[in-house]
Image: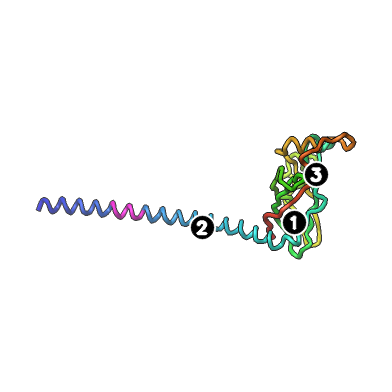
Amino acid sequence: MLIKKKSLVVALISSLVICLVLVVNLIGYLIYLELKDKDLDKAYHVMLHRVNAKVYAKHIEIVKLSASFERTGPLSGNTVLEGIVRNDGYKDISDLLIKVRFLDKDGAVLYETVFHPLEPSLASSSISAVAIPYLAASKSIIKPESSILFKKILTDCPKEIVLELKKDSGAPRIRPRWTGKLDYEILSTNF
């Protein structure tokens, strides 16, 4: 009878440990599913924005895309990319992600930058908007059949491009790798 009581105690303790392990595993699995659901939701929205960009890109145009070296004003001493985003479509654009490429004479990419042109623009006349753009203004929305000016400081622009932008137009030029060609691609759009 003594052996049976010990066996019963061991069996009860073993059963409790097994049940506890099962409950902990079940809780861990439920937490995993919740986190995975959030990741899948985020991935879904990213893919939706990319699909929107592919479908709606024919209605978005970036004009007067240019790079320059600012010599005066609050952006003095910076390489700046600027242009105008035009919405020729039928929907309000609330977010846009574009990639701009600097190309050589053969079309090879020398440098590229990815950014949101609808974030607070550096084109504002207010110095505080330049210094602290996220505190001074909110994201812009481009209505159908309208456009918006954007400026972006290129902080990691290669020296060869910066040197080419710094040159005066009258100075003799040595064959530069960057010939002034710019290309863009719309990566993501949200309405």
Q: Residues within 10 Å of mark 1 (few under 14, many from 20)?
A: some
Looking at the image, which residue is at 25% across and 54% down? 15
Q: Is residue 51 above or below residue 160?
A: below
Tell me, yes or no, whether the highlighted magenta stretch contains residue 4.
Answer: no
Identity, as a three-letter code, of the amino acid under mark 1: Ile
Q: Which residue is mark 3?
A: 180
Q: Are marks 3 and 2 in contact (CB under 8 Å)?
A: no
Q: 137 or 30: nearer the eye?
A: 30
Q: Secondary structure at mark 1?
A: loop
Identity, as a three-letter code, of the amino acid under mark 3: Gly
Outermost bottom residue? 90
**Residue 102 located left or right of residue 38:** right
Q: Which numbered mark, 1 or 3, is in the foreground of this view?
A: 3
**Residue 191 located left or right of residue 174:** left
Identity, as a three-letter code, of the amino acid under mark 2: Asp
Report x, y in % for residue 81.
Answer: 77, 44
Q: Residues within 10 Å of mark 3 (few under 14, many from 20)?
A: some
Q: Earlier in the sequence, mark 3 or mark 2?
A: 2
Magenta stretch: give its range.
Answer: 17-23
Residue 128 in sight here:
no
Q: Which residue is mark 2?
A: 37
Q: Is residue 170 above or below residue 109?
A: above
As measured in the structure, the alpha-carbon distance from the residue carrying label 3 to the one carrying label 2 is 46 Å
Please state the total of marks drawn on the protein image.
Answer: 3
Q: Residues within 10 Å of mark 2 (few under 14, many from 20)?
A: few
Q: How is the image coloured?
A: rainbow
Q: Earlier in the sequence, mark 2 or mark 1?
A: 2
Looking at the image, which residue is at 73% across and 41% down? 154
Question: Where residue 141 is drawn, which disc sits there?
Answer: 1
Q: Secondary structure at mark 3?
A: strand
